[in-house]
Amino acid sequence: MAENNVHNDFIFDKKFKALVDKYQDLKKEKSVLCKNIDDAQNQLKIAHKENVDLQEEYRNFRLSEYLSAQGDGAVKAEFRHTIEGLVRKIDTCLKLLKG
């Protein structure tokens, strides 16, 4: 009977060590994955900033086309509408400031 307990203790110790080893492996893997996530999020932030900058640059380009009268009628109409909307917002802000 005592021999059976020793054998069970040995099996338990072996399984416990395997479990601890697996835990350590998963902990390392989690650390690597968290670093990968951080790196990917940083790359995404950079790409988003570049995208926003390019969109602004493109908008400015199209606005310059309108202002230089080189754009087609649809472009001119679009920016006329945009400029009129901005002017309305400015007027509203000025009215609120005078309040």
Image (cartoon, grey):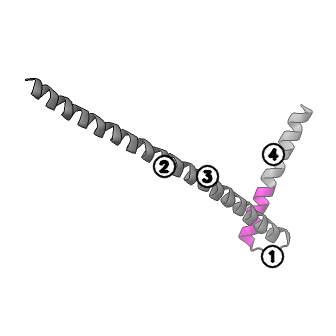
* Sequence-earlier tag: 2 or 3: 2
Looking at the picture, how far across and down is residue 18, in whole percent? Answer: 29, 40
Q: Which residues are magenta?
A: 72-83
Residue to which mark 3 is pinned: 42
Disc 4 residue crowd, few under 14, some 14–19, many 20+, Cα 10 Å: few
Q: Amino acid at mark 3?
A: Asn
Q: Which quadrant, please, contains the N terminus?
A: top left
The residue that appears at 81% across and 45% down in the rendered structure is 89
The numbered dot on residue 89 is 4
* Sequence-earlier tag: 4 or 3: 3
Q: Quadrant of residue 30?
A: top left
The answer to whether the residue labelled 1 contacts the one labelled 3, judged by CB atoms less than 8 Å apart, is: no
- Secondary element under disc 3, as helix, strand or loop, is helix
The reply, left or right, for residue 10 in relation to residue 84 is: left
Q: Quadrant of residue 75?
A: bottom right
The reply, left or right, for residue 58 in relation to residue 19 is: right
The answer to whether the residue labelled 4 contacts the one labelled 3, judged by CB atoms less than 8 Å apart, is: no
* Sequence-earlier tag: 1 or 3: 3
- Secondary element under disc 4, as helix, strand or loop, is helix
Q: Nearer the viewer, mark 2 or mark 3?
A: 2
The answer to whether the residue labelled 4 contacts the one labelled 2, judged by CB atoms less than 8 Å apart, is: no
What is the chief secondary structure element of the magenta stretch?
Answer: helix
The residue that appears at 39% across and 45% down in the rendered structure is 25
Residue to which mark 2 is pinned: 32
Q: Amino acid at mark 4?
A: Lys
The numbered dot on residue 70 is 1
Disc 1 residue crowd, few under 14, some 14–19, many 20+, Cα 10 Å: few
